[in-house]
């Protein structure tokens, strides 16, 4: 039931073939990496904050996406070349106008595909760099487009947040100040939740509970991940509700 913070164990099974069971070695040091994904408005940021409080390094793909298109970067130059100066603030070609770009790409599939082809290599490169520099107890890569951008190839295990569609739409409108039509378009163009679930190891259904309701579930998962890293636990699948 919502608000119970309940998490229950499903029978042990082999890892999904889409998820690498082998720890990465980057810059000579062993890294265990959790992929945190889910559609827009499913509570990923709240969960990331808990992992950060447990001593994990959290890499936010949305933050990285902003970094790689900052003024003066290769990213902003490529976007202007592809879409024109109209997607920059005051049409000056320097600072990305995210609202204008979002309105363009989420109303035109071809433009969205073109944008993804620009962003993917830039985001992948920067996330790999940040993983190599991470020094937390383990690293969490928070990415709504974890699968779409191929970032699942970098992680050892995947935690997926899911929520009902109406909650996602309302949260997107509140957070971004966009119209319902744009929010619906964003949700519609993201990977279906059923597909995300099939590709993930652990699932939490969260219709935006209070943080204090969600925290015990995340704490339990965190301890489970530490056991997996230490080789003390079977790689079991978790599913739960909050």
Image: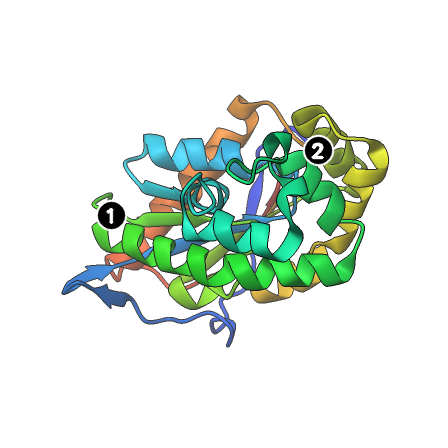
| Residue located farthest toward the left when viewing the structure as drawn | 28
* Marks 1 and 2 close (CB-CB < 8 Å): no
The label number, if any, that marks residue 172 in the structure image = 2
Q: Secondary structure at mark 2?
A: helix
Say above or below: 21 vs 65: below
Residue at 37% over, 54% down? 127
Q: Which residue is mark 1?
A: 134
* Quarter of image, res 132: bottom left
Asked whether the viewer can see residue 4, the reply is: no
Judge by depth and name the residue closer to the eye, 217 or 12.
217
- The picture places residue 43, in percent across and down from the top left corner, at 59, 36
Q: CA distance from mark 1 to mark 2?
A: 30 Å
Q: Quadrant of the N terminus?
A: top right
Label number found at residue 217: none
Q: Quadrant of residue 230?
A: bottom left
Give residue 166's position: percent from left, percent from top.
81, 37
Tell me the element at label 1: loop
Does 181 sit left or right of 105 as displayed? Answer: right
Give the residue drawn at x 46%, y 38%. Answer: 218
Mark 2, Cα crowd under 10 Å, few <14 / some 14-19 / many 20+, is: many
Protein image colouring:
rainbow
Residue in view at x 43 percent, y 31 percent? 49
Q: Nearer the viewer, residue 110 or 80?
A: 80
């Amino acid at each position: 039931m919502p608000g119970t913070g309940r998490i229950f164990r499903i029978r042990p099974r082999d890892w999904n073939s889409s998820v690498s069971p082998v720890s990465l070695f980057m810059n000579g040091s062993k890294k265990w990496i959790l992929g945190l994904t889910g559609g827009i408005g499913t509570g990923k940021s709240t969960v990331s904050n808990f992992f950060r409080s447990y001593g994990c390094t959290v890499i936010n793909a949305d933050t990285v996406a902003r970094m790689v298109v900052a003024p003066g970067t290769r990213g902003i130059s490529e976007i202007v070349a592809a879409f024109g100066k109209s997607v920059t603030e005051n049409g000056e070609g320097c600072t990305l106008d995210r609202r204008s770009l979002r309105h363009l790409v989420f109303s035109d599939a071809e433009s969205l595909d073109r944008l993804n082809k620009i962003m993917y290599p830039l985001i992948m490169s920067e996330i790999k760099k940040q993983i190599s520099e991470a020094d937390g107890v383990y690293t969490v890569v928070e990415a709504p487009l974890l699968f779409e951008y191929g970032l699942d190839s970098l992680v050892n295990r995947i935690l997926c947040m899911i929520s009902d569609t109406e909650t996602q739409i309302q949260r997107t409108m509140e957070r971004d100040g966009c119209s319902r039509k744009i929010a619906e378009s964003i949700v519609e163009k993201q990977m279906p939740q059923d597909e995300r679930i099939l590709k993930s190891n652990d699932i939490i259904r969260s219709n935006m509970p209070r943080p204090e309701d969600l925290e015990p579930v995340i704490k339990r998962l965190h301890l489970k991940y530490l056991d997996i890293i230490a080789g003390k636990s079977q790689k079991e699948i978790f599913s739960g509700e909050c």
